[in-house]
Amino acid sequence: MNEMEDVSGGKQNLALGLSTFAFTMCFAVWTIFSIIGLQIREDLGLSDTQFGVLVATPILTGSLSRIFLGIWTDQYGGRLVFSLLMLATSIAVWLLSTVSTYPMFLIAALGVGLAGGSFAVGIAYVSRWYKKGQQGTALGIFGMGNVGAAFTNFGAPFLVVALGWQQTAQIYSVILAITAILFFLLSKEDPVTSFRKKSGEKPVSVLMQMTPLRRLQVWRFSLYYFFVFGAFVALALWLPRYYVGVYGVDIVTAGMLAACYALPGSIFRALGGWLSDRWGARSIMYWTFIASIVICFFLSYPSTSYIVQGIEGPIEFNITIGIVPFVILTIFLGFFMSLGKAAVYKHIPVYYAEHVGSVGGLVGMIGGLGGFILPITFGVMNDLVGVWTSCFMLLFLLVSIALVWMHFSIRIMERKLVPALLTLPQFPEMQELHEDCHAVTMSQKA
């Protein structure tokens, strides 16, 4: 892109810093129900299913809005779209503090969920400031805004205890409105939008922006993000409830322990972007999925009592994951999810440089839907199955499917690109031996 040549490092850093800060504030608002929802659940006497629907509803709006917000960003620029989005969300958060019935909470939660659409705006805006070799790191740093979930899990419980959930929502609303104003005043038009306005070029039509969405590869990336991001959001929302229900801790302790998961799930995204630039996003996805399968396997094992008929009589023992190893395992899960989130979005500017907004919006939408569907599913499984660890059983199945689909897709692609791979023996490491045997056979025939 010729318009990228005149972009200084100072302008790039300003755009990245402001976008990351704004996304952090939006993400903190987006996950606010993980904390205030606990008090609302108690006030209204909600079941686990109803609670799951409540905390997941903002995720629905944030997910569905990503695709058209991404397209609007491609057309009108991230500076304008990001600012208006934050202002609209701040109004919805303030109105949240005025409702009192469950149906009205669900309606208000839909407005709060607009904060989640900020990701599609941010990745399109930030990617336009950097060249391809730098985009993985830049988008990884931007994605660290997920740390907003940790801020909410850590700080919101203290506000709720001290001021009540209504005043907590109002404080969040004011902070987000101030962020919107500062972002608009301090940020600059991205170089692509600026170049297009100066040249008089018209934005690409919505239909053209949607063209890449026909490709199966885009939907495969979406499944990856359904786990690494959707499951991350779902657990950030669900873990406070899990800690209270399983380990009997209070709301403040539950929030801080959930923050231990959300924090590495956010701050190491920059590392994931750098690793993706250096070693390739595909390798990082393998690391993420394999590690997540192992961790989810252990987390999904329910507390179980055994009676073994020993030589001298029955031997009784119990297998239970204590709170300390549980917290440690969730920290590692959050770490690998953060690497995977960066790796998924490293793919998009490389494969779809002219459609980052639309493709990134769709992938973000499907990933965000994971944050909507999974908490509801967790609640339903709790009510129907009656096993707390059933949520991790579901995640184990989900990440296993993602790994298998990725691996076989890559193998098929490799064989299409390199036909010589089809001629390899069943065990490629035996190729040299096969060649030697073939040479001996040919010499004997001669």
Image: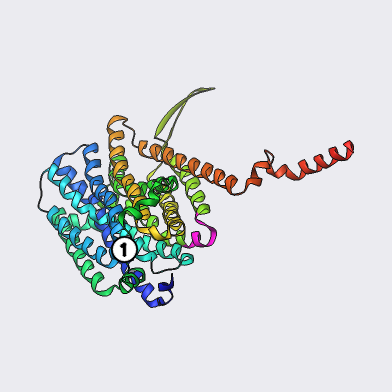
Q: Quadrant of the N terminus?
A: bottom left
Closest to the observer: 360 or 256?
A: 360
Q: Is 384 on the left or on the right of 173, as rendered? A: right
Closest to the observer: 422 or 144?
A: 422
- Note whether 160 is above or below 103 in the view shown: below
Q: Is residue 277 magenta?
A: yes
Magenta-highlighted residues: 274-281
- Secondary structure of the residue carrying tag 1 is loop
Q: Is 341 on the left or on the right of 62, as rendered? A: right
Q: Is 445 on the left or on the right of 279, as rendered? A: right
Q: Is residue 171 visible?
A: yes
- The residue at which mark 1 appears reads as 203
Please name the residue shown 40% across and 41% down the image.
395
Please name the residue shown 25% across and 63% down the image.
81
Q: Quadrant of the C terminus?
A: top right
Neighbour tally class for label 1: few under 14, some 14-19, many 20 plus, Cα within 10 Å = some
* Three-letter residue code for mark 1: Pro
Q: Is residue 260 visible?
A: no
Q: Is residue 350 magenta?
A: no
List x then y, in percent, for residue 114: 23, 54
Please name the residue shown 20% across and 49% down the image.
110
Q: Main secondary structure of the magenta part?
A: helix
List x then y, in percent, for residue 126: 36, 65
Please name the residue shown 28% across and 37% down the image.
379
